Amino acid sequence: MAKAVSTKKSNTIKLKFDTSWSYAPAPESKSAASIKPQYDLFIDGKWTKPQSGKYFSTINPANEEKLSEVAEANAADVDKAVKAARNAYEKVWKKMPAKERAKYIFRISRMMQEKARELAIIESLDGGKPIRESRDFDVPTAANHFFYYAGWADKLEYAFPNRTTEPLGVAGQITPWNFPLLMAAWKIAPALATGNTVVLKPAETTPLTALKLAEIIQESGLPDGVVNILTGAGATGAAIVNHSDVNKIAFTGSTDVGKIIQRAIAGTNKKATLELGGKAANIIFEDAPLDQAVEGVINGIFFNQGHVCCAGSRLYVQESVAKQVIRKLRDRLESLIIGDPLDKNTDIGAINSKQQLDNIHKYIKIGLKEGAEMYESSCRLPSKGFWCKPTLFTNVAQSSRIAQEEIFGPVLSILTFRTDDEVIEKANNTPYGLSAGVWTDKGSKIFNMTKRMRAGVIWANTFNKFDPTSPFGGYKESGYGREGGLHGLLPYLNLVS
Amino acid sequence: MEKTVKKSSLTISENGLEKKSSTQRLEVLKTYKIYIGGQFPRTESGRFYQPENAAGKKLGNICLSSRKDFRDAALVARGAFGGWSSRAAFNRGQILYRMAEMLEGRKIQFIDELIQQGATKAKAEKEVMQSIDRLIYYAGWCDKFQQIYSAVNPVASSHFNFSVPEPMGVVAIIAPQSDSLLGLVSVIAPVIAGGNTCVVLASETKPLCAITFAEVLNSSDLPGGVVNILTGKPKELNEWFVNHMDVNATVYCENDSTVKTMMREKSAQNLKRVFFYESVKWDSEAGQSPYYIMDTQEIKTTWHPVENIAGAGGGY
């Protein structure tokens, strides 16, 4: 695709990964998962045919094979779901003692744990992410999120001293395709714990685990209408946002759509939580443990194929160690295993969709055109499906589009700096402010940096860590509101004195 | 103790089992033993007592635990503290939830024992349900009370300074005499939710469900030694619960001013923290609160410097 950087001699010892070591295929079995050929809409506790009669396919991005087809909800379906949610809110959910509400949410968490293997397989099939990630991260974290928020349901008076809390009503929630089940959990769990009811729309390319979650919710005995799950594309999402009887919008997705939502609800009293794009700076100081930092940078940008809003997509390396770090990164890049998402050894799976792959390729072309030097893994890519080699750009200018805009793929832009002030200036010079990383052995420097960086989540000597107890969300154009932790409750509550 | 043929206690349950009395079959009686370090030994003293219910029916031969039993239990509680307190808070929550699951599954047995101890069926049922819900309540607190009671302190110097609760260690608990299940659960749950381990003396007059509760604990992924349950007489053991030099805190639930004075005095030996829960209505909302967790927590403050390059500015 492009000119590769010539390999110069370096003083650092090159790790030899190209030995006789190789991995035998270790695929997870698909037989532990059951996917129906067709899914309807989950409205008022029942599977309901879409009014339009239309269905669309969802495919496996690793081989482009159709997995299932799901219903396309139109405005009439959305209206039906909102009515069901309103009815459940007024008649059942609002009135239920909080500790009973909690027990439903605990149940959902437990059932997700019971079905963890199936959920992980479907997540990898539908989204392309490595099974290692869906099995060890997405699914357990999603279940834990329900467990955590379940416990809050009857403890809200401790979270907001000197105030009483009221749920908002019906929450319209729209989730992205990068962490389909986890994002559904981030949305549904706090909404239910605080006493709201839900209409949720999963992303059109990855609807299956949300529908599996609907099955779990049905099995859990949660009262009808408390959670409604509608599949569809942008128009369905717009119908939710624009519905007059929705009290709250929770959206995770692009900054562009976030802005559209904010405009759309401007004339209403709807509350919103927007969790949008990012262009995180990951900063390596010369005193950092470099091998650990390199691992962190690799994880920061290649986790989930780089389809992570908080991905560490801008690397700032202190000049004195830049050569060494870049060398180590290139070596490490070569050792990443790209391929079958269901293989337990896979590090990098498939790009989520053709559209996203095109977008990533567009940015790689821009990077080259802007004069940055590219280095990509020499790995072979499967012939079918959507794939992108893990890619590094060096000599990237601060003003370059690949240093300014969110690529949302396995592409890292590397820049250098000399002083603290310089790197703070550069790191904060972005409209985004979701996350950041800092690598140094000096604790006092960590706190200096974290204090001065304008981002909602900052990782020090680690990256891409998530926990149900820990709030997540952005500054500036990365959106507002927090999900997770104690702070994730407020976006779903009115405080009354 | 009636060792004669009697009706199965299951006849009083509502689940349809054994509606007709099974007079043909001799019931197997349960041996109630104490619970130390995840095992069910008899008291080392070999002694027993026979509590009776209001109707004068003997409840069984119950272990009359000794000072030595308490010391054994305190030792294993100390041994279990490191592991339990370093579990992730979330994991402790999962285990407390599992305890509730196990209790739910065995509620008929608890209702039965509460009835044997003199409760009405309705009261017994209510007590068991409330005990289950109380475990769920504290399961939820395991990874939340820290968020409420921690602080980042805005000190004036260039330091990052934060204070967090940490468990005290081994807590010795003399459980409430009434509410023999709910009271027991209500004093154990907050102590272990916060990462402590404990030695508990069950209700003297109503000890049955305390030991059966130990069986619930034993099948709940709760590591052995985190909760140790003794049966016996508070009159004999009160002193040792507050005298032991390797116990960090003592909880006492009765309103006996002589005992309370003794406890305040003895606790001074190692500045043991003593808590009196004498007038708590365990069957009300007041019977549960994160403040019960906080009673057996210390607060740890950590200072860390923040590099401060004076005048460097570097604003945003």
Image (cartoon, rainbow, N blue to C red):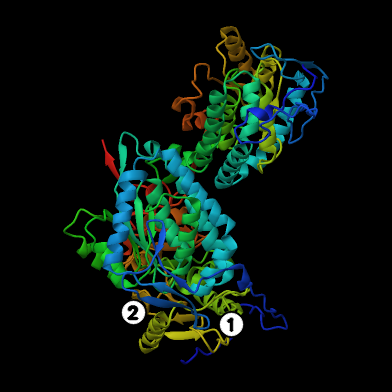
Residue type of the residue flagged with mark 2: Arg
Residue A458 coordinates in the image, percent (x, y): 43, 58
What's the residue at 78%, 17% (across, down)?
A: B48
- Quarter where residue B297 is shown: top right
Is B134 drawn above or below residue B158 in the view shown?
above
Is label 2 or label 1 in front?
Answer: 2
Residue A461 coordinates in the image, percent (x, y): 52, 60
In this picture, residue A400 sits left or right of residue A148: left
On-image quarter of the C terminus of chain B: bottom left
Residue type of the residue flagged with mark 1: Ser
Residue A313 coordinates in the image, percent (x, y): 43, 72
Q: Which of the two discs, 2 and 1, labels the residue nearer the N terminus?
A: 1
Secondary structure beneath disc 2?
A: helix
Question: Residue B166's mark?
Answer: none
Is A59 drawn above or below residue A123 in the view shown?
below
Is A41 drawn above or below residue A329 in the view shown?
above
Q: Is residue B112 visible?
A: yes
Q: Looking at this view, is A232 or B151 the one in front?
A: A232
On-image quarter of the N terminus of chain B: top right
Residue B156 coordinates in the image, percent (x, y): 37, 41
What's the residue at 64%, 18% (across, down)?
A: B269
Question: Residue A401's mark?
Answer: 2
Chain on which label 2 sits: A
Q: CA distance from mark 2 to mark 1?
A: 29 Å
